[in-house]
Amino acid sequence: MANELPTESARPKARPARSEATRQRLVAAAADALLEGEGEFEMSQVARRARVSDGLPYHYFGSKAGALSAVIDAFYDRYYAVVNQPLDGSRPWPEREFERLQSWLGFLYGERLAPIVLGRMGRTVQVAGLESARQDQLIELARRNIELGQRAGDISETIDAGIAAAAIIGAIRQAASQAFQAPEPPALAVLTAQLWGLIAGALGLPTREPLVR
């Protein structure tokens, strides 16, 4: 009917606070189970850890794959927040971005899920599929950031910002994967220095580490 108002079900609804709190508890329980199983878990473990009925995780996630997706998405939300943190734009680009790299790698080394998501599970179909869109976001952020450096005169305008961004984000991702799969990961300071050398080389910057105020 032309004059009929949309039904309540047709309108987007915000998730009630209690429902969201339960979902976050289930996501945390699934993350704990994933860690305990070194990349494997069962929905019954999630329910037991969250102290809920066996059916409640299915109500929120639909399936084990849905629960895994929720855990990985939450990991990337934390990851993205660190990479995209606002820094003082009045500082020289190399100084500011070296600090970002330190925070970025510090997060990965301190995040308990990073060795599983970026290491063991990094090549699985589900993780790769979820990660692809996130990597595209990071590359776009990096491209804009490099262009800011070019406008400030810190980076040569002859550098193709898009290509450099893809190379840098890809290198950091692969370096993290290799570090987490190594029998003994390199020290954080060593990996930071190596990656800064790669970034500086890609952007035509001095390879020495900037002094961060």
Image (spheres, grey):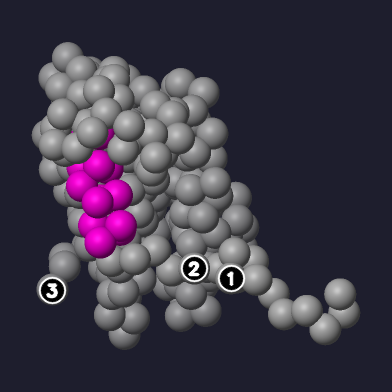
Q: Are marks 1 and 2 in contact (CB under 8 Å)?
A: yes
Which region shows up in magenta? Answer: 18-30
Q: Residue furthest right?
A: 2
Determine which of the numbered discs, if any, sits on residue 13 in the image. Answer: 2
Q: Quadrant of residue 17?
A: bottom left
Q: Quadrant of residue 77?
A: bottom left
Determine which of the numbered discs, if any, sits on residue 119 in the image. Answer: none
Determine which of the numbered discs, if any, sits on residue 8 in the image. Answer: 1
Q: Vertically, is 6 above or below 61?
A: below
Count of residue discs: 3
Q: Are marks 3 and 2 in contact (CB under 8 Å)?
A: no
Q: Quick one: label 2, few (<14), some, or many (20+) residues within 10 Å?
A: few
Q: Quadrant of the C terminus?
A: bottom left
Q: Quick one: label 3, few (<14), some, or many (20+) residues within 10 Å?
A: few
Q: Is residue 93 visible in the rendered structure shown here? A: yes
Which residue carries the number 3 mark?
213
Q: Quick one: label 1, few (<14), some, or many (20+) residues within 10 Å?
A: few
Kindly identify the amino acid type of the residue bearing the numbered disc 1. Glu
Q: In this image, 171 relative to 197: left or right?
A: right
Q: In this image, 151 relative to 27: left or right?
A: right
Decide which of tag 1 and tag 3 comes sooner along the chain.
Answer: 1
Q: In this image, 24 relative to 76: left or right?
A: left
- Residue 183 in the image, given as x and y percentages of width and height: 17, 14
Kindly identify the amino acid type of the residue bearing the numbered disc 3. Arg
Residue sitting at 47 percent across and 39 percent down? Answer: 131
Q: Is residue 159 visible in the rendered structure shown here? A: no
Of the residues tagged 1 and 3, which is closer to the observer? 1
